[in-house]
């Protein structure tokens, strides 16, 4: 992975603050003990419905661009990653990207860039680049890769519970910005966006309790909420987010 060296050079090592780490260890330990019967039932249901592992494990990027193994209950069919390429046209974030008319692009293209086959306007170049690279986040409505038990545990956020073990290991905090897959984190290396990685990775966060389930949330809007949390996270903001998490977690995604 290539990251923004201009941003990272000279910055100290990132670590979860001591007060935040104490709360994480205590709360995660209590929750795992209290929820252990539920964890066992969900594990059995996942195993009975479809072949494959109970826990989905993948590399994610968290605070300071540190990669770690991220745990969730498996909610998709075992070959979900291979099916994704054929479903990219359903990505809601991609559908939200505005497409400008040719005369609007021509008017804004007052800065010309040189490429192999001649000059191109800056605005047209950026649109061309976005279409080629695709969006950072992926969200598919009525995703056919999700199993029946997968729909239930996703809508209630039960699929996130194994991340309590990530919290105990110190990879994540209870509250923070969502850790991103490697291919998503690699796109967020511009100086405007890397600030989101100043905050610890979290199970819940500002975006989840304020915007989750709203169909009109843009990709840039989500990034800005991540940056806002990274700049001003505190004990009181974390407590407020935790207080708001339960009703947000059981909210069904609007369609």
Image (cartoon, rainbow, N blue to C red):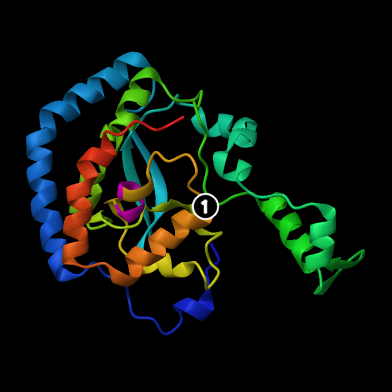
State whether residue 169 appears in this view.
no
25 over 6 or under it: above or below? above
Q: Tell me residue 83's x, y (percent).
A: 57, 29
Left or right: residue 222 versus residue 121 is left
Q: Tell me residue 128's x, y (percent).
A: 76, 55
Residue extending farthest to the top is 48
Is 206 a magenta residue? yes
Q: Which residue is mark 1?
A: 219
Q: What residue do we see at 42% from left, 41% from top?
A: 214
State whether residue 154 appears in this view.
yes
Q: Tell me residue 173's x, y (percent).
A: 24, 56
Majority secondary structure in the magenta region: helix
Left or right: residue 79 versus residue 68 is right
Label 1: how many Cα within 10 Å (few below 14, some 14–19, many 20+): some
Q: Tell me residue 56's x, y (percent).
A: 36, 35
Secondary structure at numbered mark 1:
helix
The magenta segment is 205-209
Residue extending farthest to the bottom is 10
């Amino acid at each position: 992975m290539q990251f923004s060296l201009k941003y990272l050079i000279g910055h100290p090592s990132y670590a979860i603050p001591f007060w935040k780490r104490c709360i994480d260890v205590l709360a995660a330990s209590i929750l795992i003990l209290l929820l252990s019967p539920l964890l066992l039932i969900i594990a059995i249901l996942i195993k009975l419905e479809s072949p494959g592992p109970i826990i989905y494990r993948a590399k994610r990027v968290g605070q300071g661009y540190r990669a770690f193994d991220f745990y969730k209950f498996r909610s998709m069919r075992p070959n979900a990653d291979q099916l994704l390429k054929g479903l990219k046209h359903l990505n809601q974030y991609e559908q939200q990207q505005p497409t400008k008319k040719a005369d609007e692009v021509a008017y804004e293209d007052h800065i010309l860039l040189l490429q192999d086959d001649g000059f191109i306007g800056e605005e047209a170049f950026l649109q061309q680049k976005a279409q080629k690279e695709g969006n950072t986040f992926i969200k598919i409505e009525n995703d056919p890769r999700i199993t029946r038990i997968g729909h239930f545990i996703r809508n209630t956020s039960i699929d996130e519970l194994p991340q309590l073990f990530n919290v105990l290991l110190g990879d994540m905090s209870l509250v923070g910005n969502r850790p991103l897959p490697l291919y998503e984190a690699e796109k967020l290396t511009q100086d405007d966006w890397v600030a989101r990685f100043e905050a610890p990775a979290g199970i819940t966060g500002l975006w989840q309790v304020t915007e989750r389930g709203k169909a009109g949330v843009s990709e840039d809007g989500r990034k800005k909420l991540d940056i806002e949390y990274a700049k001003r996270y505190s004990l009181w903001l974390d407590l407020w987010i935790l207080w708001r998490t339960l009703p947000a977690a059981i909210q069904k995604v609007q369609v």
